[in-house]
Amino acid sequence: MTFTVHDLISLSPVLLIGVGILATLIIEMLVKESEKILGWFTFVLLLSVAYLSLILLDHTALVFEDKFLTGGRVNIFFFLFSFGAAVVSLLSMEYIKKAGIHFGEYYIMLLSSVLGMMLISGATDFIMIFIGLEQMSVCFYVLAGFNRRNERSLEAALKYFLLGSFATGFLVFGLGLIYGAVGSLSITEIVIGYETLKTSPLFLTGTLLFIIGFSFKIAAVPFHMWVPDVYQGAPTSVTALMSTTGKAAAFSALIIIFSPIIQAAYPSFFTPVISVLAVLSMLYGSIVAISQNDLKRMLAYSSIAHAGYMLIGLAAWNEKGVSGVIFYLVAYTFMNLAAFGLISLIEKRDLRGTEFSDYKGLGFKQPVLAGLMALTMFALSGIPPFAGFFGKYYVFLSAIEAGMTWLAIVGVISSVISVYFYLRLIVVMYFDNSDEIVMVTPSTSAMLGIMISVLLIIIMGVAPGSIINLINSTF
Amino acid sequence: METSTILNYLLFVPLAGALLLMVFPSANKNAIRYFGLFTSLVTFIISLLVYYSFDSGVYGFDKFQFEFKYSWISDLSISYYVGVDGLSLILVLLTTFLTPLTLLSTWNSIQIKVKEFTFFMLVLEMGMIGVFISLDLFLFYVFWEAMLIPMYFIIGIWGGERRIYASVKFFIYTMFGSLLMLVAIIWLAVYASSSTGYFTTNLLELYKVSPALGLDIQTYLFFAFALSFAIKVPLFPLHTWLPDAHVEAPTAGSVILAGVLLKMGTYGLVRFCLPLFPQASVEYAGWISLLAVIGVIYGALVAMVQKDMKKLVAYSSVSHLGFVVLGIFAFTPEGMQGAIIQMINHGLSTGALFLLVGFIYERTHTRQIADYGGIAAVVPVYSAVMLIVALSSIGLPGLNGFIGEFLILIGAFKSPVLSNWMYAIVAASGVIFAAVYLLWMYQRIFFGPVKKLELRGLTDMNGKELFIMVTLIIFIVWIGVYPTTFLQMTDKYSSALVNSILSVNGIIIR
């Protein structure tokens, strides 16, 4: 295995985060009250990783014995993970203090999970995907239960761990079958042998199991059972991380597995599978979200529905579909970060205060927070001129181009249903009055994180051109 | 293509005003009001400038002026593309004319959250103007949807008791229609890309391509578009959101809703449904006209039995807009002209009626007709103004309503597509019903002995209210006496559109 300078440069985002994790460990050990500086350290580190990923967009390199790819689309994902996590670290600083879980390990886990995500998105070998997924998931299990004195947090961690392991079982079994069929776990090998493989039942079953394993991670129905409890129980800043970058990482894995397939025409075998997953997720997520009274739970179901919209892009599987999914992921990441960030601000010390009724009359008591929340809700429901609308437009466009207009129509129906519960929050905030006094003094760091997210939501809605350009330039 | 930037000013002045409003302190209500009024007046002046340099001699339904094009999302060839023709311009003028009047009317009635209210009104104005001047379907859709947000807040925050129900119903109802339209827009653009070679949502290019579609495909697309517009109009039986929204909305919201928002539905039918899907439009003209005529009669009959003044006016809108749709689907130049002028008439007359109901509601806090009686002697000016406006809504010759309804009925009689006099005959009876419900309401409120003691203390209209009404009445009389000023704006447009649709369908005009 030889490493050139070019490889090293291309790998630098991953290396930097690895070095960063070690540095965090050391700081945590040596410095007293390290948690005070670790937050900003993590933020700066992740921001530089994000910056590096962007400037290295053209540095394509195949490293680690052809098991890992950087540059192009992979770097877009790198950017999404690190930038999203940077915003999460901003949101976390005050929140974990409030929740009484202010420990340096939090940031170490956060950084490690980002490393895991990066490994997934750059993988050209199934083993690499698996390693990355485990790294990410283990960090998430720990983070979900980070509030170890809170029962719900513990429940979330355990539930996530048990069901997550179950999903991993599917995945490993799938990988076994694929290995049996191909004799290798390398994506390139699959591309080479694709003509014979596409009729091999072993390979198809293996791929199907792989898809099922990742459907758990992206929270697609019927593999969504863990989502509401985990999203609700986990500390809000952790939920923000899991529901955004975590989901994006899983999607990047799905894009990788389908990539070789696109080169040899998409087999009709998987189109119905993905379409069914998409339809079920959209409708189930939107319908069940209506009856939720807890905001975090409502967003959990909404995240299931959003997974459905993104799956439309995968089902259509054309160029617009893939870039649509990536655009959607970016938009969705910042919409959810803003939403969970605002929830974490309004949440009370005892981690209550996430119910709809806690937001009564917020619109005029906390005009800035409520205004941002309202904007985020409109964005999530796909109303122009915000990012969510354009994401939907893009995936619907890909579906119609692929001749799957019906899928777009289901998406539309589900969008209309989902408007109801997003609007409900706005109704509570603006149209209801309450005498209860809400004392929220938003910290600068959290506000910065929320502002960044909201600004991106607006920019991606008003001027999505540049981001689409960026995504399309990687094809 | 000649470019002009004036439409950008028209679009962005309200937005800039709304954003500038953010820096105002909430406590200084009058400064906020004056600034809001100022912004909307500047917008009105810009629209007048457009009007004065507008050339109404251009023949064609796909000829636009003051075009401005800027590549917005280049990868999907979506552009920010605006322009006006007679149809757009007359509706833009209606919008920019009604907005300052509405803002003026809220001077006393809106006392809480004045800043937010003015902000939403200005954003709403931008959205409405955007809908009328967009020449790119994507851009059009963005405005069409984005406009829901301010209206939703206006109903929800400043509305009546059942405002939550009304605002959510309004939002979801309209959103359902629009999203299907979005699918149709994308479908059409994807289809067009197979013949033009590239994906585009440019309306003018789609005009050229889409009439070549087969009738079955046209039918699907036509209904996807028409559903969205019919909900907005609202066409019977999709009207159920309207009474709720109108009754619960604050006066200003009702005026804008009736005055402009409903027109967006009929505008959409004329601008998109007809020229994009000419065969399907003609094929289903009979059915749509049937619904329109049912709406005329149904709206009038339901209006007749209303106890609430605002609800009465709301149902009268269903009836009046039925006329407009009938005029559109008659496919005659007269019908089209009548429909367009009737859109303006309805905006003026119904807007005025809502304002008048609002004025008296501010004084008595009741809208129940039964709570009034014999107030003609107490508030003579108010009752005189109300009479003029009611008569204009009924369609008395010499006032605006007559012109529109008369042209529509002529159009429906002569229609080569409907070719059945029944539509016109039944619709004509709607005029009689209009006289019944409006005059009956008038009689119960104003005539007879003064019903309650406290009604004696009613104050008549103040200067501001009178100013608003006089301004509206000037136009009500102007259109009634000399409609040419307004008709000539859309004259060439209407005949070009009708001729082109009929010739695509191979129908020879009698």
Image (tube, coloured by chain):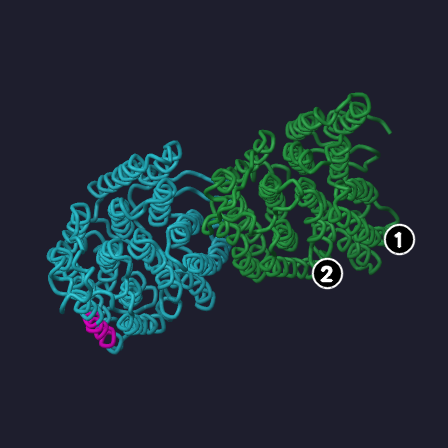
Chain colours: A green, B cyan
Q: Chain of mark 1?
A: A
- Residue drawn at (82%, 59%) of the image: A200
Left or right: residue A248 versus residue B62 is right
Q: Is residue A26 above or below residue B309?
A: above
Q: Is residue A118 above or below residue A421?
A: above
Given residues B447 and B8, the one toward you in this image is B447
Q: Is residue B186 above or below residue A41?
A: below
Magenta-colored span: B424-436
Can you identify the residue that label 1 sits on?
Answer: A180
The kind of residue on which mark 1 rests is Gly
Left or right: residue B260 versus residue B175 is left
Can you identify the residue that label 2 sits on?
Answer: A269
Q: Chain of mark 2?
A: A
Given residues A376 and B117, the one toward you in this image is B117
**Which corner quadrant of the image does residue B226 belong to?**
bottom left
**Which corner quadrant of the image does residue B375 belong to?**
bottom left
Element type at marker 2? loop
Residue B140 in view: no
